[in-house]
Amino acid sequence: QGYGKRVSINEFRSTSRGTIGLIALKFKKALEDQDKLSCFCIVREDDEILVNTSKGIMVRQKVKKIPCQSRSATGVTVQKVDDSDFITSVSLVPSTDEEEA
């Protein structure tokens, strides 16, 4: 609950039709039945994300603070959540150019 990670796009090979696919995330054994993937998106290192929980908590986080890991890694805690809470969505924060202001 609340885990996240960055994975290099180079770790994913392209597959053709009819293949089984690739493992992109490893859930913790004790929580395999409870854990769900909330978001999977392509980001740049200078991007920011917005993590939303079911209890209405919103946290803005810089992508570069989330470490790069292998595809099979579980990840690191991006947002601490209670047992009754869970991540509902993860959104990419639009970048603002300071030159426009």
Image (cartoon, rainbow, N blue to C red):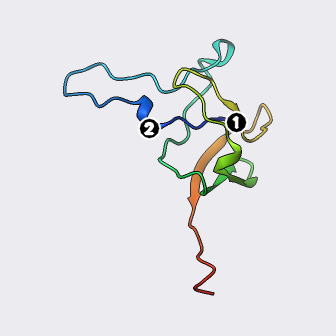
Query: Which circle's residue, 2 or 1, is located before the other in the chain?
Result: 1
Which residue is painted at 19% across and 27% down in the image? 17
Which x, y percent locates residue 78? 72, 40
Identify which residue, 90 or 63, lies in the foreground. Answer: 63
Q: Say above or below: 14 vs 91.
A: above
Tell me the element at label 1.
loop
Image quarter of residue 91: bottom right
Tell me the CA gap for discs 2 and 1.
22 Å
Image quarter of residue 49: bottom right
Q: Say above or below: 80 vs 59.
A: above
Which x, y percent locates residue 97? 58, 76
Q: Farthest residue toward the left?
A: 17
Which x, y percent locates residue 52? 67, 51
Q: Residues within 10 Å of mark 1 (few under 14, many from 20)?
A: some
Which residue is painted at 65% across and 17% down in the image? 28
- According to the image, label 2 marks what residue? 9
Label 2–label 1 contact, CB within 8 A: no
- According to the image, label 1 marks what residue? 2
Identify which residue, 61 or 89, lies in the foreground. Answer: 61
- From the image, which quarter does the N terminus lie in? top right
Q: Farthest residue toward the bottom?
A: 101
* Residue 86, disc: none
85 relative position to 87: left or right: right
Type of the residue with mark 1: Gly
User: Mark 2 or mark 1, which is nearer to you?
Assistant: 2
Tell me the element at label 2.
helix
- Circle count: 2
Q: Residues within 10 Å of mark 2 (few under 14, many from 20)?
A: few
Type of the residue with mark 2: Ile
Identify which residue, 60 or 67, lies in the foreground. Answer: 67
Identify which residue, 68 or 93, lies in the foreground. Answer: 68
Which residue is painted at 74% across and 54% down in the image? 59
